[in-house]
Amino acid sequence: MKLSTKGRYGVRAMFDLALNSGQGPIPLNNVAERQNISGHYLEQLIALLKKAGLVKSVRGAQGGYFLARDPEEITIGDIIRVLEGPIAPVDCVNEEEMEICENAEYCVTRKVWTKVRDSVTDVLDSITLADLVKDQAKLNEKSYMFYI
Amino acid sequence: MKLSTKGRYGVRAMFDLALNSGQGPIPLNNVAERQNISGHYLEQLIALLKKAGLVKSVRGAQGGYFLARDPEEITIGDIIRVLEGPIAPVDCVNEEEMEICENAEYCVTRKVWTKVRDSVTDVLDSITLADLVKDQAKLNEKSYMFYI
DNA sequence: GTCAATTCCTAGTAAATAACTCTGTATTTT
DNA sequence: AAAATACAGAGTTATTTACTAGGAATTGAC
């Protein structure tokens, strides 16, 4: 029931792009350094996010990546699904194409996994990158207060 | 975000013991056959469940395993924690001993994982083996109706 | 037009994990 | 004594994880 680094790094990278959104393309190495992630590794992750249409890119010098939509329009669930696959504790409750199990209809443990899936998706689909940006802003306010 | 076979098999095996609870010790091979799980593999899982105090055993011929508590007193969360480790999508929101991360206090993505953890634990800790037994009984009633 | 900065693409790899299998010992009932 | 069971630990194969490495293609700046 653990996330891999793909999901964790991916969310942090997207959050980083959200913080810098509206400032033109951000070089991936900047993101990698700020977030303390291997640059080459992050390239592979961002490639998936680009293929999924969550980020866009500009090649060449002064190029980089930026969010394909407003931060309000990108949820953590969107990111996790791209990098970790469908949100489901077991394959038989996969949202997209569930592995057919002949007695799924009559499986009581399956109901448990369905409930887990639904509660996780509720959380992840309700949080957007804009929410995280707001949270960060609040934190910055607070830590500013310490210096008064 | 997937469960391994440990968690899935473990829940099914415990459910099987719950269905047969109050009937004395159940040989593990019976459980394995009914649930279509490798017997030797299930032995390793049940050893963990025994160590954790969820099942008890009787050795020798006519021996077997049985639930250490009433089915009402054993949650799916209890089982999952033994077989899959602490319920947490990332280590920094581990219930027991969270890996110390110096800026955990100021980490906005961490709040996301905390919410995920809480929603999953809410579900898993609210469902007992007795609930599953009841669900199964209802299903049996229904399928009986098809034969009328 | 060249250089530097960048994205893009593919392959390789070491370590860990998953999901078992295999073999044997100890204990208890019949 | 034999059969049925729990208990114990090592060995195995395949997959996944989390990278690293190297280079080709593109573009802006000078």
Image (cartoon, coloured by chain):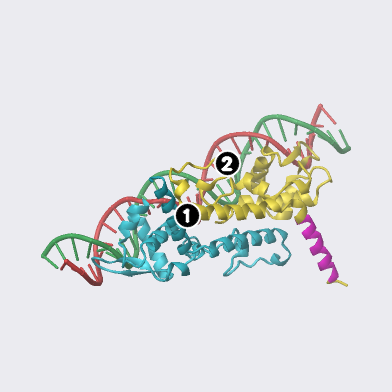
Chain colours: A yellow, B cyan, C red, D green
Q: Residue A96 carries which label?
A: 2
How far separated are the C-alphas under marks 1 and 2? 20 Å
- Residue B14 visible here: yes
- The quadrant in which the N terminus of chain A is found is bottom right
Helix, strand or loop at mark 2: loop
Between residue B54 and residue A3, name the one nearer to us: B54
Q: Please tell me in which quadrant of the rendered image residue B58 appears.
A: bottom left
Between residue A104 and residue A54, name the one nearer to us: A104
Using the image, name the chain to which the residue with label 2 belongs.
A
Helix, strand or loop at mark 1: helix
Q: What stretch is highlighted in magenta?
A: A132-145
The residue beneath circle 1 is A109
Between residue D12 and residue C19, name the one nearer to us: C19
Q: Type of residue at label 1?
A: Thr
Q: Please tell me in which quadrant of the rendered image residue D14 appears.
A: top left
- Above or below, comparing residue A48 to residue B110 in the picture: above
Residue B64 placement, left or right of B120: left
- Mark closer to the chain start, 1 or 2: 2
Asked if the stretch drawn in magenta spans residue B77, the answer is no
